[in-house]
Amino acid sequence: MPALALTGGAPVRTQPFPAWPVFPEPDIAALTDRLRAGDRSDDDPVIEFEQAFAAAHGARYGIGVNSGTSALELALQALRLDRGAEVIVSPITFFASVSAILNAGLVPIFADIDPDTYNIAPAAIRAALTPRTGAIMTVHFGGVSCDMQPILAIAQRHNLAIVEDVSHAHGGTWNHRGLGSIGDAGCFSCGSGKNLSAGGGGVLITSDPVIHERASGYGELNHPRRQRRRELTGARETRPATDEFFPYSSGNRRLHPVHAVLGLPQLQRLDEQTARRDANGRYLASLLDDIDGVTPRRQDPFATRAANHLFVLRYDAHAFGGLSREVFVKALNAEGIPCQTEYHRPMHHADLFKDVDGELTRVWPRANGAPDVDYAAMHCPNAERACAQEMVTLPTRVTLDTRDGMDQILTAIEKIQTHQSELASYVPDTPSEQSQWSISGS
Ligand SMILES: Cc1ncc(COP(=O)(O)O)c(C=O)c1O
């Protein structure tokens, strides 16, 4: 009689983990009310959402935008770096962090991760600095804070801006300060799977009135909301002085009010949900301490509250008799534990940097005066190993469960380890079947 669910045994867990995202009935009613009111409505939920979102994360200003990618693009544009300036970023992130850099006319430079935390390593940032470096983008991967103290020191010393990509880390903190409020600007996605889901859209937060004013201008030139924001905050571009003069090309990145209506009640629940995600994550990490071959990423003391958009594990096949990561994930899924291997390639190996023949040689963009950047020569061995062999992620709804759920994860992993021989001849199916809970671009 097989023990493992993958080979016909009974699964450890039969109840689903909590659904995510959740829109309770009153939220749906507020949304339909708003749709019925249409443009006749006098109130502007976007301004209310922006202000509440910024306050919840410890920043002065917020700008609602149509995506997290737009927030990143606006933040980078607002820095007004020279075209072709370099932005140092982790290779372990979603594609949007990198495309935002390129779309802003800047050049991504990848600095390797710390092998234990999976966030960008300050030493690698130092090694990647050049006279053309203009900014550092800190991606709080999976919702756990980057090591901000040395990063702030590097930025100050070299006069660099910091843009935080906080799309995995709504409600998370570093030294008890809201992630997104530590650098010059913080950029959040409120897309449907995110820890704060407004069904779409994003928010840029900043405490810098100049960034606020510029990003507002680039995102929604001459829209009434921009004027209203200015009235409310008293923000002004430093130069030029007149209100209407904005001699830059801009786009329409506005957040639609329906997303603000959906986001406002989610914001009220964020604190309690993040506390639960953090507490369960810490508990699960303590349970996994005793298991060989499945190591939770290290969470340093400065990461005072982890948003755990993804709970990241490092898998070592040797401790499971050579069982491939894909089969391990499949076996855990069969035991009723959602998990996936979704970051298969580090960003410096993205198709974007390949020529048509698939070789890693493309230099893009060839910005005016910027020397070529050879992505084929860029090595980030820790990120490469994490993507190719180690990283397994549990989606955010897992840490929204109870402690019992965390205990079941431990039980399921122990069960796979004990009965690994049942899987010795198991042949995995197609990649899509291997990660049925995978949400691309989470
Ligand atoms: C780390 C990260 N940055 C940026 C984004 C972009 O957000 P959006 O999809 O709202 O444009 C995402 C979205 O998945 C993300 O995961």
Image (cartoon, helix red, strand yellow):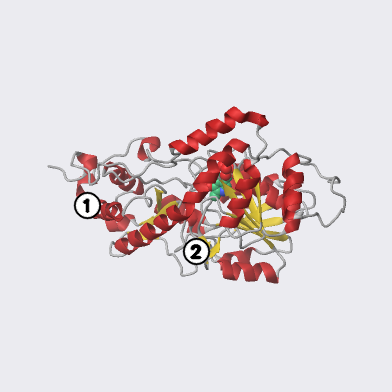
In the rendered image, residue 43, in percent from the top left (x then y), is placed at 65, 39
Q: In which quarter of the view is residue 185 placed?
A: bottom right
Locate residue 353: give its quadrant: top right
Residue toward you, 197 or 429: 197
Does label 2 or label 1 sit earlier along the sequence? 2
Dot 2 falls on a residue whose secondary structure is loop
In the rendered view, would you say 210 is above or below 324?
below
Residue 337 relative to residue 370: left or right: left
Residue 291 or residue 366, whichever sits in front: 291
Q: Nearer the viewer, residue 128 or 103?
A: 103
Q: Measured from the top left, where is residue 2 in percent x and y?
A: 15, 43
Amino acid type at mark 2: Asp
Picture residue at 39% right of the left edge, 38% below the top: 431
Q: Which residue appears at 28% of the width and 61% of the height?
A: 291
Q: How crowded is mark 1: few (under 14 residues within 10 Å), some or many (20 or more)?
A: some
Q: Which residue is drawn at 77% across and 51% down?
A: 83
Quarter that holds the N terminus: top left
Q: What residue type is labelled 1?
A: Lys
Instruction: Find residue 114 and name its label.
Output: 2
Q: Quadrant location of ligand 1? A: top right
**Is label 1 in a helix, a strand or a loop?**
helix
Question: Which mark is on residue 415?
Answer: 1
Q: Where is residue 226 in the image (x, y as percent from the top left)?
A: 74, 44
Q: Residue 196, position in %: x, y?
A: 51, 47
Q: Are marks 2 and 1 in contact (CB under 8 Å)?
A: no
